[in-house]
Image: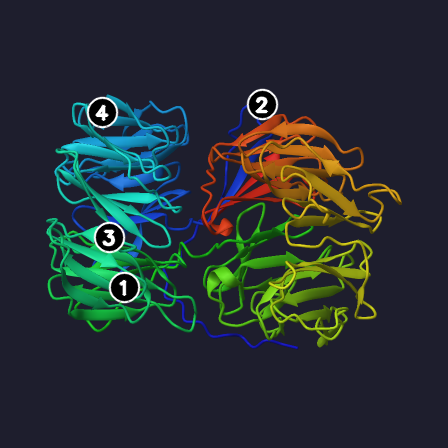
Amino acid sequence: MTMKPILLLLFGVLLAGFGLPLAAQSSDNDLFQETLRIGRGAVLHAEWNPDGTLILVDTVRGAWLYSFGGTSMSDFSHFEDVRLARFNPTRPLLAGVDDNNRAIFWDTTTFEQVATLPGHDVYVRALAWRPDGSQLATLDRTGRIITWDTDQQVKLLELRLEGADQITWSPGGSHLAAVDSASGTIHVWNTAGELVFAGTPEYVGQYGSKITWRNETQLLQSIFDEYSSGVLWNISSGEHTDFFDLGYFNVYSPDGSKLVETWASAAGIKDADTRETLAYISTKDQQPIEVAWSPDGQLVAVGTGTVDINTHPWVIVADGTTGEIVNAFEYDYDIKEIKWSPDSQTFLTVDFANRIFVTDPTTSNPFISPASRVHADIGTAAAWRDDGEVIAAADTVYGARLWDTETGQLLVRLNSGQPVTRLAWQPGGTLLAAAGGDWWQSKNNNVYIWDSRLAADAVDESAVVIPHVYIPIAFAWSPDGRTLASAERHHYLRLWRVDAPDLIRVIDTYAIRLAPFIDYTRQINSLAWSPRGDLLDYSFSSSGNGGGVDLVDVSAGTLVIGDTPHNYASIWEWTPDNRLIWAKWGQYGDGGVPPPPVHDITLGGEGVAGEGQPAPVLTGLTGRVRKAIFSPNARLLIGFDDLDNGIIWDVQTQTPTAHLTAISDVVWSPDSTLIATYGRDGLIRVIDPQTGATLHTFNRHFYVHTYNPANNAQVIWSPDNRRVIVLDSGVIFIYIITENE
């Protein structure tokens, strides 16, 4: 089976220097040393400089500056070790934060560093220029806020709001506001540092809140829930007005006289005083997810999102008074950000594939410069080849790319014609399997297999394409690397063999069912092989019985009755001697009546308990169990509760080896000797599972707990356990263990 090359028209600025080896910069106590960075990074924020000649793109790999001459974008400069870069609105300055959480100033006429301002001891999460450019405010994750004098380059004030995650200046710069979006608490200070207002809404939505200034004395707090609401606070009088029908996104015009509110499939321009609807903006029955007023207040740009790649999103430009559509521009991916140029003549758009477009809203030709793809090269998945010499990384629009792990050189582009979200290398081999998924608006339901030995001009022509009826939710190589198994969301398993590439074997899970009826609500969620390669396990969820795990005899294509967990609140792992063991928790427990306490975990599976013996129960967590993960060798299990505690147990003895706190997730090393943890403080650490001792902290990276876990920083261990990838917002950071054996 072959796949013909797909002709893909690439509008892009093709730039060198994506992967750069780094000099050793590691303290004696560090377990890991950074050796390489690959990729320019996803767009976290973009903006124009005050005269509209430069575009700044903020990424986890620093600030990238592109010059814009009216028809094209080109490289201008790059500041490697800076986060949260922002242009000063009135002075030739650029500010950001370095790896040591110091505020850094650069002169944008010479682009020389002019100040380094220490003050924060922990991760800085936000900064904001005062509108007149005279001060900079910085906020760290403890809620500590520092204001800095721009001209004297010294610290002015220290303020604090515990839990604050947003700061913003009033339009005239007389007040600085901070909000803890989880609790909804707002504090407002004047320029002397005096707290002039504090408020908390009666109700805070489960998705937090956001603050937006209307003018110097009024502050709108949008509260996000199933039905959005809001509060308009008057910081002078302390009075407030509750809105129970506020839009999902709410943006004031520059003069504060009008407010754009968005709903599920429309947007409205309202009088900011009376909230009377002045005009509607048609969004083509799509969800508006980004709104931007032009600086002169004449136009509004509304970006939309879709749930289907075949229904393209739009940026709709409308008259800011009448709502009449001036122009509409179609895109391939949902709109991430819109930024107008200072003169209101053009705007730049960033889509969720991290492509950058510059648009003249008055022309029929939407893009007055080629679209830049330089921030689109690395998506949300990466995988080591077994020899450790090559990394495969998802491409946000194209398919996948292969990179040399020593030099960072791009080896080959692999074209699937759509974004890739899952990758798997053949064990001990050179074949790479890939597929799209739910998070990325897949164009088709194919699984692709490429041979990385082939030359760049031949790899796509020789690719194998495995079509599926439904979304391929999971795939896995057999331990010997000879067979790739894939599972669709519903119904079918497919088996492809290396020695018979033109044959695809299909197992119909409905046809081999053990029950006398077909459960049409069943959805498959995972797929894995037994160590001997004789069995497949797949998990399913169902409205009929809550789900479970089935075993399939690969040779016979039949279901096998075995000791498998029932209900979806469970985890399982194959032992090296080919036994499936499992753990269950919460209201499901071991299926007994009554179920065990919700803070315990029940073990089960072949050989876990002797005949006639009760199932072992792991105790010690104080909150409700929410998750558990076996080590790859199935000898250890870590459980998490809803109080962010973690306990690691020895499975055989059921005794704890380590207690952890403030932890949300872990990734085991392949040899089960180390774990990478995602802390609730946002930091990623490497921990010894036998003692709980922290061996290394990746201070450069911050885990933000987004709804889509793939958008968080991810740790990916190398097969030999000696290196890790930290895949962070479109950049691959490679670290190597520096300690001696």
Compare marks 1 and 4 and give the one earlier in the sequence: 4
**Badges 2 and 3: C-beta atoms under 8 Å apart?**
no
The residue drawn where x is 33% and y is 22% is 119
Compare marks 4 and 2 and give the one earlier in the sequence: 2
Residue type, mark 1 in image: Ser
Quadrant into which the N terminus falls:
bottom right
Q: Would you name the residue on which mark 4 appears?
A: 153
Residue type, mark 2 in image: Asn
Q: Which of the two marks, 2 or 3, is nearer to us in this view? A: 3
**In which image quadrant can residue 449 be found?**
bottom right
Residue type, mark 4 in image: Gln
Q: Which of the two marks, 4 or 3, is nearer to us in this view? A: 3
Q: Position of residue 692 (x, y in %)?
A: 64, 27
Q: Position of residue 291 (x, y in %)?
A: 25, 57
Compare marks 2 and 3 and give the one earlier in the sequence: 2
Compute the Cα span from label 4 to label 3. 35 Å
Residue 452 makes an appearance in the image: no
For label 3, the SS is strand
Compare marks 2 and 1 and give the one earlier in the sequence: 2
Q: Nearer the viewer, residue 580 or 494?
A: 580
Q: Would you name the residue on which mark 2 appears?
A: 29
Q: Would you name the residue on which mark 1 appears?
A: 369
Compute the Cα span from label 2 to label 3. 48 Å
Q: Nearer the viewer, residue 2 or 175?
A: 175
Q: Nearer the viewer, residue 251 or 542?
A: 542
Q: Would you name the residue on which mark 3 appears?
A: 250
Q: Which of the two marks, 2 or 1, is nearer to us in this view? A: 2
Q: Position of residue 646 (x, y in %)?
A: 61, 34
Name above or below for residue 201 compared with residue 120.
Answer: below
Name above or below for residue 565 compared with residue 61.
Answer: below
